[in-house]
Image (spheres, helix red, strand yellow):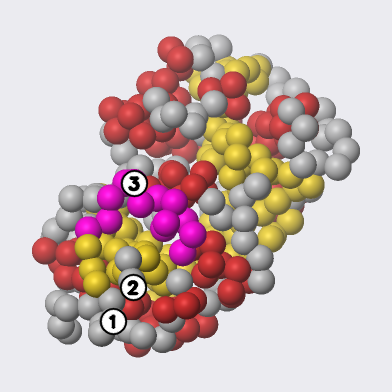
Amino acid sequence: MSSSPPDGFTSRVVTAADIEAAAAVVRAEEKTVRGRSVWDVADMSDFWRMVNFDDAAWALEQDGRLVAFAAGIERAERADWWISVHPDAAGRGLGTWLLAQAERRSRDAGAARMDAGMFAENAAAKRLLEELGFRDARHYFHMRIELDHEPDVPQPVEGVAIERFRRDDARAFHAAMNEAFAGDPGQISVTFDEWERFRLDASDTDLSLWFVARDGDEIAGFARCDANREGGGWIGILGVRERWRRRGLGLALLQTAFREFHRRGVEHVGLGVDARNPTGATRLYERAGMRVLNEDVVYEKELT
């Protein structure tokens, strides 16, 4: 594979400031394969703030316009990549070139595995990844509830109180999150200092949309929500520690978040969930009134 990009295109390093141009590429791709897209900078921000812009991000331009990019998050022996090509430049080998750069970087960084996400409806991306030795590994549902009426009042869980997050909850919240999602193959584990910088202190974080379920001095469960994702409210992460599961706490946290978004006049709330989540999260969300809106797929390739 040549290190030079396909004819008619130039390559350069991606920077954090490219987020708007990259979001426009993703929006165009999603609209082409799904018929609609509200994708914007807010939907990009979670991933973008963790990208390794020094060594794992490239853009391809045509006449000075960004038309494709690859951006990677590198963690221990795993590299997570997001590669997108604008439909106007599809079929020109850009995806193949970017995947080759991403794989080369992943190997050089010592990753044992690389992951690449895609929209489930993108048949061309599926063919390309499979031709390059990737396998279908995980599916993620995007689920949504329309808040066209007042959500149900959460049923109390004995001994547990749901309250808003307080700043001095930070370390306990981070620890509870890591415990609740231990073993989840899609979870990107970060240190407390990284989490504090990328999440807690981020300019778009609204701590009034974070909730904790307290059992005495312990955090039994949690919900971290975002004010604006996919054109509405978003539940970024919701979890219950194992000792408190099967008591209705996950549903109570969901309904607490729904009611707060409804109070703010938000029309719908979404979230993403592993379709094969072993805790039965998808069934929980369906019981809460959510429905599957669309699906993403993660392909993976073993590098060792």
What is the spatial separation of the Cα atoms under label 2 and label 3, in whole angstroms?
A: 18 Å
Q: Which tag, 2 or 3, sits closer to the chain's start?
A: 3
Q: Position of residue 11 (x, y in %)?
A: 23, 68
What span is in magenta? 13-25
Q: Main secondary structure of the magenta part?
A: helix
Classify the position of the N terminus by image quarter.
Answer: bottom left
**In which quarter of the view is residue 161 placed?**
top right
The amino acid pointed to by label 2 is Gln
Question: Do the residues under discs 2 and 1 have CB atoms within 8 angstroms?
Answer: yes
Residue in the image at 42% along x and 79% along y: 89
The amino acid pointed to by label 3 is Ala
> Is-magenta flag for residue 19?
yes
236 up-or-down from 213: above or below:
below
Residue in the image at 32% along x and 46% along y: 16
The amino acid pointed to by label 1 is Gly
Residue in the image at 42% along x and 72% along y: 85
Q: Is residue 283 left or right of residue 205?
A: right
Q: Position of residue 168 (x, y in %)?
A: 43, 12
Q: Which residue corresponds to mark 3?
A: 17
Q: Which residue corresponds to mark 2?
A: 62
> Is-magenta flag for residue 194?
no
Q: Is residue 176 visible?
A: no
The residue lying toward the viewer, choosing from 86 and 104, is 86
Residue in the image at 25% along x and 84% along y: 7
What is the spatial separation of the Cα atoms under label 2 and label 1, in whole angstroms?
A: 7 Å
Secondary structure beneath disc 3?
helix
What is the spatial separation of the Cα atoms under label 3 and label 1, in whole angstroms?
A: 24 Å
